[in-house]
Image: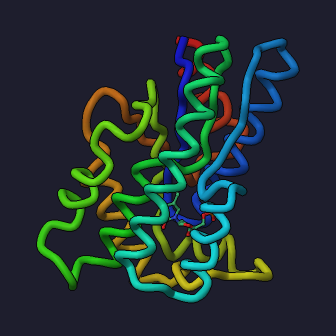
Amino acid sequence: MKHFVTFEGIDGSGKSTVSNLVYEKMKKEGYKIILTYEPTDSWIGKIVQKCIKTKSDPFITAYTFIADRYEHCKQIKKWLDTGKIVLCDRYVESTYAYQAAQMQKSIDNPIKWLKELSKDRYVIPDRTFLFVIDPKKSLVRIQNRENLIPFEKIDFLDKVQKNYLNISKGARFKKIDATKKIHEIVDICYKDILK
Ligand code: TMP
């Protein structure tokens, strides 16, 4: 059984829909379960939202995402300590994938820099699902959303996806073909969490 599970992937990959459905299913079955997300709704999370919308300096954006997570982790630890399963829609790999894509022209090896900044400042998940989809397809899925954000562009999401694939190696990660039917993906995630 996995207790702390994160969902990662580019915008429009379906991870929010799937994490919601897995949460509803497990809650109905009686599991003590929390669904949370980043950026959070805290005061720091609100600054993060502002950074995204106003296309702030990538360094400021990176620091605020990490600060938001640092605060979020205090709550995540409490939930885990009281025996709850915690599902989190976006987490540390979002920072590595997105902010590294933003910073790749400013510094050498931005992923390394971001990892060092985050080191020992977050709870390590038991499982991270990475939803993989061609950015062209993911953008078609979200093109009718009312508030498209500056990150939702093909070239940028291409870089983000490459970063995701590069960092998602090791036993913690499970890649999900995000073009599969939603109910199939929910089933894969659900069964994997219970293993
Ligand atoms: P959302 O669409 O999942 O609510 O996330 C908002 C955007 O924030 C999304 O485009 C991904 C981006 N993001 C980062 O750039 N870095 C991060 O660390 C996180 C958590 C999200």
**Residue 177 visible within the image:** no
Residue 30: x and y in percent read 83, 12
Vertically, is 126 above or below 181?
above
**Residue 142 percent location from the top left of the image:** 68, 73
Q: Residue at x 30, y 27 (%)?
A: 171
Q: Give me the residue at 77% from left, 21% from top.
A: 26
The residue at the far bottom in this view is 54
Above or below, 116 relative to 55: above
Asked if residue 139 lies left or right of residue 56, the reply is right
Q: Report the residue at 60% width, 61% height from top.
A: 44
Judged from this view, the residue extending furthest toward the left is: 108
Q: Is residue 97 left or right of residue 166?
A: right
Q: Could you say where residue 65 lies in the image, as x and y percent from the top left?
A: 48, 61
| Picture residue at 54% right of the left edge, 43% below the top | 7
Q: Residue 29 at x, y = what percent? A: 83, 14
Position above or below: 170 against 80: below
Q: In this rendered view, identify the residue nearer to me: 53 or 127.
A: 53
Q: Nearer the viewer, residue 135 or 86?
A: 86
In the displayed structure image, the side of residue 39 where residue 65 appears, left or right: left
Identify the image's colour scheme: rainbow, by chain, secondary structure or one colour: rainbow
Classify residue 58 as left or right of residue 84.
Answer: left
**Residue 163 sits in quarter:** bottom left
Vertical order, 10 against 139 (above or below): above
Q: Quadrant of the N terminus?
A: top right
Q: Residue 168 sits in which quadrant?
A: top left
Note whether residue 187 is visible: yes
Quadrant of the displayed image that contains ligand 1: bottom right
